[in-house]
Amino acid sequence: MNRLASRHTRLLGAGLLAAASLAAQAPAEPAAPAAASPLQLVAVSVTPPAPGPDTLCQLRVTLRNDGDRQISQLAFAVAVNGHDLPVYGNQLFMDAIPPGGEAEVRLYNFWSTETGRPAPADGKYRVEVTLREAHWYRIEMEEDVEVWTPLGEVPGLPVRAAAAPGEPPARPAGEPGA
């Protein structure tokens, strides 16, 4: 049995050496630059502004559509102090954001503390919102019926923004004072 283990060790060592040699010879492909998204998370708003433990909080985001078509079918992920809120896993928000426009989207309320997510020791909450995906739409009226036609995924997602209730809001990069 000792001879068998020794043989397996030598084979494993030879395999690892061959894999390392191939990896060293393979040229690394440059990462494709991320496409800028025409859909931006402009603001994250949490009320009340300084929640304590066991406080029901309202969550809203402001989105800006820099594209040339309407955007809807918004899929979000939300984390409070690093803990994902599972309700967003299978939910879509069908708010329509017009081209060149901004819209406030009301997301789900959440409790500042829950089982498995205690109040932070320093009392500071951090809420991170990720817009995971969205779709272009043509929305028009046909014989008094609103018809939504999907036109494909919005590129450049996900986009993220965060809020720290009780602290002044951070300005997005590139704005004066940032």
Image (spheres, helix red, strand yellow):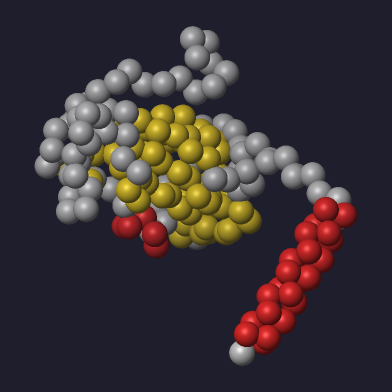
Using the image, determine if residue 124 lies above or below residue 84.
above
Q: Residue at x 46, y 60 (%)?
A: 145
Residue nearer the viewer, 167 or 5:
5
Number of labels in the image equals: 0
Which percent across, then down, holds residue 158? 54, 45
Residue nearer the viewer, 50 or 142:
50
Residue nearer the viewer, 12 or 155:
12
- Residue at the farthest top position: 177
Residue 144 in view here: no
88 left or right of 171? left
Examine the image and state in which quarter residue 157 appears.
Answer: top right
- Residue at the farthest front position: 2
Q: Residue at x 68, y 40 (%)?
A: 35
Which percent across, then down, holds residue 114? 18, 50
Using the image, determine if residue 80 lies above or below residue 121.
below
- Residue at the farthest left position: 54
Which percent across, then down, holds residue 124? 25, 29
Residue nearer the viewer, 141 or 74:
74
**Split into 4 quadrants, where in the image is the N terminus?**
bottom right
86 left or right of 34? left
Examine the image and state in which quarter residue 14 appears.
Answer: bottom right
1 left or right of 168? right
- Residue at the farthest bottom position: 1
Residue 164 in view here: yes
Which percent across, then down, holds residue 41? 48, 35
Q: Residue at x 35, y 30 (%)?
A: 163
Q: Residue at x 82, y 66 (%)?
A: 18
